[in-house]
Amino acid sequence: MTQRVPVRLETWSLRLAPPLATLFIPIAVVAIFFWVPTDAGLGLSQRIFYFHVPCALAAFASYAAAGLCGIAYLRYSRSEWDHASNAAVGTGMLFGSLVLITGSIWAKTAWGTWWTWDARLTTFLILWLVFASYAMLRALGRGNDMTPRYAAVLAIVGTLNIPLVMVATKLWRTIHPQVIGNPKGGIEDPRMLATLGLGMVAILALCVWFWALRSRILRVEEKLSVLEASRP
Amino acid sequence: MGAIVWKDLLSELRNRDTVMSLFVLGVLVLVIFQFALNLSPAETRRLAPGMLWTAIVFSSSIAIGRTLISEREAGCLGALVIAPIDRGSIFIAKLVVNVVILSVFEVTLVPVFALMADVSILTVWPQLAVVMFAGTLGLAAVGTLFALAAAGTRARETMLPLIALPLEIPLLLAAVQCTEAVLTGASLTGLGAWANLLFAFDALFVAVGWLAFEFVAVE
């Protein structure tokens, strides 16, 4: 029963996410470049924000999903959950890398430097490193039956560690703009908020699409290796 | 559980491999810092807490896996897992052993560090001991939890620092800040948010290790 849940999620994701992404990505691109007003203070460079923030959301959602699927895998010992967790770390790494790259590009124009040890940049870098070690564990532990279990524990611990990393880096230092939920200096223009919403739907749909594809590939690969092993 | 702790400590006491290698490695890191950064005495004093924790984190991440890896090689872990005890207890026992070994290492390293960095620890040592213990507990918990995972990969000993170091960054930040405050004369109650973070990290990783060992210690 429980092994059907990730497979069903995957099937529905492959039905819903591709049309959503195909529809919303062009709309979001048009909105970002032609419709939304230019920011008065930051100018043109602020437009990368509509791409950067949705990517960060997708990365956080992926890491959280990886942790949850890891818990389900340890609980039910079904490889479908392991594939779901592994695939979520994959999308987390992809969108996490995009967050670091787009953030760096923006920081160069806004702050005049590619990198600073600001709280949010540091938080993201640490998360990226934790899940990079997950990828290393996967790659170097291939062939060991226990690797999925260790990987699940690492995904869970990595996810639980997120609040601590946030607190630590915030105590350490911060200059990152606080845009959402900030009474002063936040975005107020409804067109800006709408564009941000469009970007979020587009990127999240793309993220879910990638996750479902990756999860299916991992499952098919496992089936294939079982078939090959049983060939006379 | 007491038997596991006693057995491991006895075997460590007989050959003293881990503590000796930890100590030499720790002193080397401190010395390398001096040569690499060419610090003036004032700079050394300012950077001292960071240097101390860097030495501890690197040495421990390299040496801490030994208590589990050597058992795996000797086939002892398989026997422990099928023994009629809770696997969480194996984690706690291993954690205690690692904390004791690391504490012995720190007790030898800190005086050397105090001499090199010219900081006085005579008046602040009780507070310093509490901070060091809290930091050590967190390091040992992460190391103990993932030592088995690292041992199962092709990279073996190299894998443990790769997994442990990124996870330990919040702990490292908190431990360095607390040590700095303590060395400049702050009381334990005056450490504020950094001390809370340090204890939160300890609580999280000890609890998760205890719960998760049930699932990873299967041979």
Image (cartoon, rainbow, N blue to C red):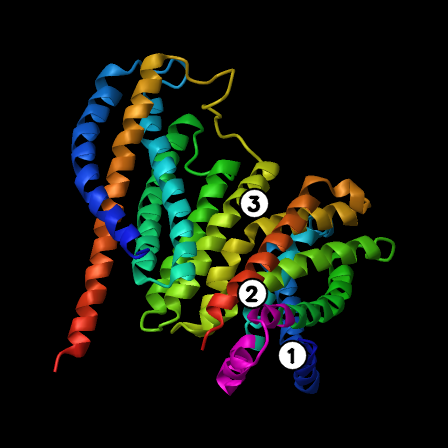
User: Can residue B118 be seen in the rendering of this structure?
Assistant: no
* Mark carried by residue B143: 2
Q: Is residue A121 above or below residue B201?
A: above
- Residue B76, magenta (yes or no): yes
CB atoms of marks 3 and 1 within 8 Å: no
Asked which quadrant contains residue A40, the reply is top left
How packed mark 2 is, by other alpha carbons closer than 10 Å (few <14, some 14-19, many 20 or more), is many
Marks 2 and 3 on same chain: no
Residue range in magenta is: B68-93
Quarter holding residue B62: bottom right
* Residue at which label 1 appears: B4
Residue type pointed to by label 3: Leu
* Res B196 quadrant in image: top right
- The percent position of residue B97, horizontal first and vertical second, equals 66, 73
Q: Amino acid at mark 2?
A: Gly
Residue B197 falls inside the magenta stretch: no
Instruction: Report the chain holding disc 3.
Output: A
Residue A43 horizontal side relative to residue B147, left or right: left
Query: Cβ–Cβ below 8 Å for labels 1 and 2?
Result: no
Circle 1 chain: B
Asked if labels 3 and 2 touch by Cβ distance under 8 angstroms, the answer is: no
The x and y percentages for residue B90 are 59, 72
Dot 1 crowding, Cα within 10 Å, few <14, some 14–19, many 20+: some
Element marked by disc 1: helix
Three-letter amino acid code at the position of disc 1: Ile
Q: CA distance from mark 3 to mark 1?
A: 32 Å
Residue located beneath label 3 in the image: A164
Residue appearing at x 41%, y 50% in the figure: A68
Alpha-carbon distance for marks 1 and 2?
18 Å
The span from disc 2 to disc 3 (Cα, nearest Å) is 18 Å
